[in-house]
Image: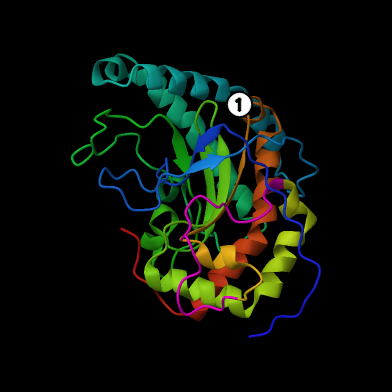
C-alpha cells in the first residue's frame, strides 16, 4: 500500500533515566504475572508539571472538599513510604489504623476522580471505587517476591460491557483511566493494557486503516502537553507478519499494549488543585480512549479480564 508523503507529526517524548513503576493492579509487566500483581512496566519519565484550566465544572463545595482531601495526601504518601520500608505482617498489623486512614483518603480521591470523569465521559455511569481499586494484599503463592503488601494505591475507572456491571473497572478490557499513587512514582495512564491477541490485532488493523485519525489525536495540543505518543516499553522487535512494512508508524504496530502515561511529582499530588490537574490530564487522554473503545465495539466482544 502506498501512503501519501506528508510532514510527520511531531512527537514529544518526556523521558529520563529515572524509572517509574506502571499501571493497573499496580506495578505493570507485559505478561500476566502469577502473583496477581497485573502487568508491570518500567517507564522512563520525568515530571512536566503545569496544568492549564481543566474545564471541569466543580460541583458545590467541590473546591473546599478538594483542598481538605489533598492536604491529607501527605499522610497517604507517608504511610506508603513507611510500608515500603517495613513490608511485613507485624508492622502492618501494628499500623492497621494508619492503613485504614490512608485507604479512606485514597477512596475519597477516587470517588472525586470518577465523578469528574463522568462530567465528560458518558461511558462511566454506575462505576464506584470498589469496581476500580485493588486490594493492598499481594498473592505471593507463585511469586519469588514474598512481601505481603503492595507499596502503592491504584484506581482504574473504566467502562464495562453494556448490561454487565461485573466487567467494569479493573475487570474491563476496554481503554480506561488509571491513577497510581506511590511515593516518588505517582503517575496517570490511559489506554488498553495487556489486551488479548485478538483485541491487539484488532487495534493494529484499526490503526493501520485509520492512522490519520490517530495522528490528529496525538497532534492535539493537550495530548502533546502530557503524553506525546504510545509508551514504548512493551513492544515487538519488528512489525508483525501480515502488516504493511511501509506503514508510516511502524512502532504503533509493534505495540503489545496501547498505553499513554505522564508522571506526577509528590508535590503535585499533595497540591490543593491536584484533582483539577488530574482531570485535565484525563480529558486530554479521552480522544485516544474513544478511538480504542470504538475498535473494541466494532470488532465485537472479547473475553473478559479475570
Magenta residue span? 226-245
**SS under mark 1:** helix
Query: What percent of the width, then of the height, locates residue 186?
Result: 55, 34
- Looking at the image, is 10 positioned above or below residue 135? below
Can the viewer see residue 122?
A: no
Rendered image quadrant of residue 262: top right
Dominant secondary structure (helix, strand or loop) of the stretch shown in magenta: loop
Based on the picture, tell me whether residue 236 belongs to the magenta stretch: yes
| Mark 1 neighbour density, 10 Å: few (under 14) some (14–19) many (20 or more) | some
Instruction: Indicate left or right for 211 with 99 as reference.
Output: right
Q: Is residue 217 above or below residue 141?
A: below
Residue placed furthest toward the left:
141
Looking at the rendered image, the quarter that the C terminus falls into is bottom left
Q: Quadrant of the N terminus?
A: bottom right
Residue 216: x and y in percent read 74, 67
Which residue bears the numbered disc 1? 266
Q: Position of residue 201 (x, y in %)?
A: 46, 73
Q: Which of 115 and 278 lies nearest the eye of the viewer?
A: 278
Amino acid at each position: 500500500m502506498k501512503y501519501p508523503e506528508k510532514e510527520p507529526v511531531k512527537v514529544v517524548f518526556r523521558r529520563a533515566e529515572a524509572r517509574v513503576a506502571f499501571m493497573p493492579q499496580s506495578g505493570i509487566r507485559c505478561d500476566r504475572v502469577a502473583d496477581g500483581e497485573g502487568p508491570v512496566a518500567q517507564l522512563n519519565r520525568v515530571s512536566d508539571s503545569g496544568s492549564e484550566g481543566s474545564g471541569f465544572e466543580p460541583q458545590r463545595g467541590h473546591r473546599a472538599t478538594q483542598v481538605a482531601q489533598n492536604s491529607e495526601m501527605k499522610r497517604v504518601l507517608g504511610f506508603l513510604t513507611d510500608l515500603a520500608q517495613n513490608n511485613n505482617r507485624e508492622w502492618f498489623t501494628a499500623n492497621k489504623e494508619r492503613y485504614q486512614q490512608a485507604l479512606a483518603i485514597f477512596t475519597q480521591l477516587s470517588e472525586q476522580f470518577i465523578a469528574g470523569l463522568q462530567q465528560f465521559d458518558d461511558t462511566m455511569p454506575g462505576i464506584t471505587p470498589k469496581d476500580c481499586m485493588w486490594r493492598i494484599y499481594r498473592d505471593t503463592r507463585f511469586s519469588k517476591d514474598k512481601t505481603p503488601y503492595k507499596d502503592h494505591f491504584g484506581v482504574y475507572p473504566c467502562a464495562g460491557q453494556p448490561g454487565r456491571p461485573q466487567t467494569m473497572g479493573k475487570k474491563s478490557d476496554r481503554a480506561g483511566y488509571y491513577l497510581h499513587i506511590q511515593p516518588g512514582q505517582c503517575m496517570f495512564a490511559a489506554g488498553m493494557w495487556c489486551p488479548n491477541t485478538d483485541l491487539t490485532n484488532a487495534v493494529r488493523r484499526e490503526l493501520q486503516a485509520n492512522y490519520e485519525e490517530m495522528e490528529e489525536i496525538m497532534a492535539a495540543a493537550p495530548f502533546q502537553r502530557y503524553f506525546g505518543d504510545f509508551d514504548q516499553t512493551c513492544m515487538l522487535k519488528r512489525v508483525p507478519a501480515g502488516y504493511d512494512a511501509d506503514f508510516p508508524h511502524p512502532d504503533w504496530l509493534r505495540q503489545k499494549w496501547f498505553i499513554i502515561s505522564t508522571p506526577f511529582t509528590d508535590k503535585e499530588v499533595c497540591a490543593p488543585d491536584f484533582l483539577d490537574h488530574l482531570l485535565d490530564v484525563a480529558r486530554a487522554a479521552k480522544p485516544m480512549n474513544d478511538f480504542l473503545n470504538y475498535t473494541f465495539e466494532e470488532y465485537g466482544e472479547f473475553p473478559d479480564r479475570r
